[in-house]
Image (tube, rainbow, N blue to C red):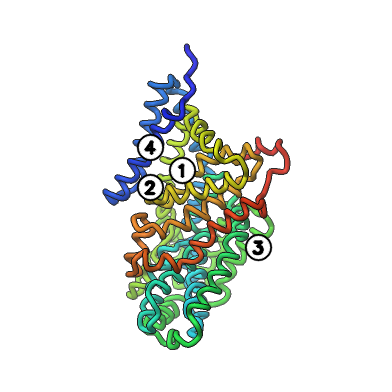
Amino acid sequence: MSEPRQPSLLVSLIPAVSLVALLFVSIAVLDSTGHVPLIAAAAVASLVAGSWLGVPWKTIEHGMVQSISAALPAILILMAVGLLIGIWIASGVVPLLIYYGLKILSPEYFLAASCLTCALISLATGSSWSTAATAGLALVGVAKALGIPDGMAAGAVISGAYFGDKMSPLSDTTNLAAATAGADLFEHIRHMLWTTVPSLAVSLALFLYLGGSSSAAGVESSVGFREILETLQANFRLTPWLLAAPLAVLVLIARKTRPLPALIAGTTVGAVLLLVFQENDGAGQILSVLYAGHLSATGVPAVDELLSRGGLTSMMDTIALILCAFAFAGVMESSGMLARLTHGILALARSTGALIGSTLLGGVAMNILASDQYLAVVVPGRMFREAYRERGLEPKNLSRALEDSSTLTSPLVPWNTCGAYMSSVLGVSVGAYLPFAFLNLITPFVSLFYGLTGFTIARLKKQADLHLLP
């Protein structure tokens, strides 16, 4: 039996170009998802590997299984996150955090306060989309009444919403980036503080400069905000005791507990808080919330949209996307085509700074070409993962670069799902808010600066550690 042929760069590009083309048609033209294009691209890659390169089907199948098995720890974490979100909403933990977030809104510093409010809400929920559709929409409405330009208000909302989305362990993109790079979830989040916190500080300074102190009086008296606050108070018993759930998770994180047991512990504490502080139907309600999430029925659309989330089923779409993407990556890896593509790129990336710059550019390019932030995380992540390993760089460097580019630039592309969503929900064009989405614009450059200077770049302690990486 003859040995499989080594793929050329041109042959290796066939599945990659097919993937990009199929994703563009599916997402940008047909307004569909990336699942089927990934399966189709995996089929194209398998056909090229089998018929052209002579790779046995058993090798291809084994490659897919091995690739998917590497994603299983992240899939378990995503399932735990779904359980946690549902139970934390039903128990009042998330409503309490949202209530506190809205209460800190200062009318004197509207834009900066709007950014911080959305950051807190998004941290609590793990969702930039829900934050923009609720508090963000209300903030843009208040800004219109106050004569503040729509673009500025929307930029503040998006900056805050994506800060929380990027830094929350409840966020699917945060979990996805860590999984794709093979990084520990909480190590990944801590590593992102170096790029995201300075970017947020600069963003807040710019919002303070733009907003001034006299243009935002009357925010606290806004009907929309009063309605949200009153609805939360009427439907949940809001007590500081509910902070026990997030505090429990934070303590476990500080003690370097692994993500899965920390999240399960937080879910358990949340279930106890639900039984103690909120009206409930006992164990039956807990099981229902854990499986299907919390369905809010307050009668106030803004609140119901924000709080109807979570549950095991809410993560199935993202998990399916991960399985499809990792299957495609498995075919590419087992056939040698992914390595050939990576080496072609690495020929240009001769330094750590160039490698991180290539990762950042790859994330932006995928947001533009594939129109989906999840794919912008997975595809470059799988392509560059081995390159970081070979250079002795810890996986959290890759996961941070993926989030700094793929997650944050997604709402800045009008035809990307995130850009289209933010524009339609906030009623502000991407072109209008793009110059004011300071956090999203600044963070990739901070990340590039760190890559070029080596500052905060974490290296494997010794080459022997390589075999410990997933």
**How much space separates mark 3 and mark 1, taking CA atoms?**
34 Å
Tell me the element at label 1.
Answer: helix
Disc 4: CA contacts within 10 A as few (<14), some (14-19) or many (>=20): few
Q: Is residue 260 left or right of residue 150?
A: right
**How much space separates mark 2 and mark 4, taking CA atoms?**
11 Å
Q: Is residue 351 left or right of residue 436?
A: right
Disc 3: CA contacts within 10 A as few (<14), some (14-19) or many (>=20): few
Would you name the residue on which mark 2 appears?
A: 370
Horizontal and vertical percent for residue 11?
41, 28
**How much space separates mark 1 and mark 2, taking CA atoms?**
10 Å
Q: Which dot marks residue 17?
A: 4
Q: Which dot marks residue 251?
A: 3
Amino acid type, residue under disc 3 in the picture:
Val
**How much space separates mark 3 and mark 4, taking CA atoms?**
46 Å
Of the image marks 3 and 1, the number of the one nearer the N terminus:
3
Would you place residue 158 above or below residue 256 in this image?
Answer: below
Tell me the element at label 4.
Answer: helix
Amino acid type, residue under disc 2 in the picture:
Ala
Q: Residue at x 47, y 19 (%)?
A: 4
Horizontal and vertical percent for residue 463?
70, 37
Tell me the element at label 3.
Answer: helix
Of the image marks 2 and 3, the number of the one nearer the N terminus:
3
Would you name the residue on which mark 1 appears?
A: 379
